[in-house]
Image: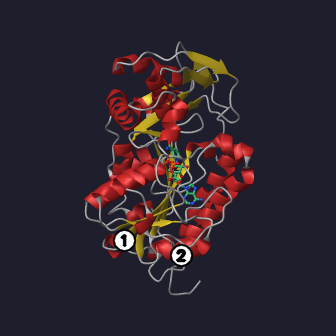
Amino acid sequence: MTATNVGTSLGSVAPDSDSAERAVLITGGAGFVGSNLAHRLLGDGHRVMILDNLSRPGVERNLAWLRDQHDALEVIVGDVRDASVVRTAARGAGRIFHFAAQVAVTTSLDDPVTDFEVNARGTLNVLEAARTAERPPMVVLTSTNKVYGALDDLTLRREAGRYQPANPTISRWGVDEGRPLEFHTPYGCSKGAADQYVLDYAHSYGLPAVVFRMSCIYGPRQMGTEDQGWVAHFLLRALAGEPVVIYGDGRQVRDVLFIDDLVEAFLALDGNRQAVTGRAFNIGGGPGQAVSLLDVIDTIPALGLRRPDVTFEAWRTGDQRYYVSDTRAFATVTGWRQRVGVAEGMSALHRWLAAFVGGRAKTTRDHVDGLSDVVPLAGAVGGNGKTGAGQMHGQLPR
Ligand SMILES: NC(=O)c1ccc[n+]([C@@H]2O[C@H](COP(=O)([O-])OP(=O)(O)OC[C@H]3O[C@@H](n4cnc5c(N)ncnc54)[C@H](O)[C@@H]3O)[C@@H](O)[C@H]2O)c1
């Protein structure tokens, strides 16, 4: 580290205007959250660079969609595990939204080493690229409610379709950031480590950096599977006329947040850099958008689809019976408010899924596989973790 790069206290955070005109780097920018944010930023006239290894099936279609509309988009097909690729991508960036991740608890249990390398080491690579930059960019990390563990100590009432906490404060407002950290599952550990590293880089090095601990986000461009993206997964099953497997009793509660509201939360960071730096915020739909898995299944007929048959399997490791975000801290600092209701959001997601994959898919598997039905990319990183030289956007499918 050079002494001129970063300060040693939060007091040294550069003003927002310092990075406003510089490019925005989005790691994992081809994914669900990243492509939605990229679309918004490009539409607002910002320069955007995406770094993504396209390892999530179907995300190349998100990239093709972005490129169709935005000539200014720059892309590196590369891996966040490769520090030199991350440094190259971060060069000149004023803000880094670090979304690239191994995103599922289930796959982290199958392969905890890869999970660690992508989520923990990959985040360290991003932080080092930011810390050693000539003008350190702001770093935004999307962490998870899983850092609070299984929340087994919450006393819950088992109501008809859902669990409800006995504690009146949690029932009214949700879980706040004062909740002790308790990492469960390899995914919880790797995301939790990333979360803590980001906060520490703010505290130890004065890097402008903030953490969003996110609940369930849903919306268009989400390639939901049984492992991650359950709202989209349920709808894909319903579109295919297939049953849904629920792990647990389906009464577990989450506060769902529509993607446009999350994008607004990212934009709300502008102008509030000093106030948010070094802090973690719980971001979700809050108590007003708290739904059980069974509640979501029950909304499906209102979309004109048959309610899917449901079968139940054993609870998954680390699954929380109840998690709802208390978003008051972020709202107080930035003025952000959640706006899109579940019915409206589900309808938008349904329209997108039906238009994008509904016509040609016969089964859920076809839906997801069909999303990958494009020209393979030279230089894309495979499952072996080896990275080719970053490929610039000439080689991407349209
Ligand atoms: N969607 C949610 O409900 C939710 C909830 C909490 C946290 N998050 C976090 O938000 C972020 C974005 O999630 P998402 O739903 O958009 O997931 P996503 O899978 O759609 O997007 C992740 C992107 O990262 C890319 N990627 C994966 N490994 C990579 C690597 N090693 N190098 C480069 N790129 C890589 C994938 O190809 C994909 O495009 C993730 O960090 C996730 O953990 C999401």
The answer to whether any part of residue 52 appears in the image is: yes
Q: Residue at x 32, y 70 (%)?
A: 20
Residue closest to the far top = 160
Q: Using the image as rendered, state which of residue 313 and residue 124 is in the foreground.
A: 313
Q: CA distance from mark 1 to mark 2?
A: 14 Å
On the rendered image, what quadrant is the N terminus found in?
Answer: bottom right
Question: Residue 390 in the image: x percent, y percent?
Answer: 52, 71
Q: Residue at x 43, y 25 (%)?
A: 239
Q: Residue at x 53, y 20 (%)?
A: 162
Residue closest to the far left = 44
Q: Using the image as rendered, state which of residue 127 and residue 207 is in the foreground.
A: 127
Residue flagged by tag 1: what amino acid is it? Ala
Tell me if 244 is positioned left or right of 15 in this view. right
Question: Residue 325 in the image: x percent, y percent?
Answer: 49, 39
Residue receiving disc 1: 23
Residue receiving disc 2: 87
Tell me if 82 is positioned left or right of 97 in this view. right
The circle drawn on residue 274 is: none
Residue flagged by tag 2: what amino acid is it? Arg
Residue closest to the far front = 375
Question: Residue 261 in the image: x percent, y percent?
Answer: 35, 44
The answer to whether any part of residue 266 appears in the image is: no
Compared to residue 358, the image places residue 391 above or below, namely below
Whichever of callouts 1 and 2 sits on the residue coming sooner in the sequence is 1
Q: Using the image as rendered, state which of residue 89 and residue 129 is in the foreground.
A: 89
Compared to residue 111, the image places residue 52 above or below, namely below
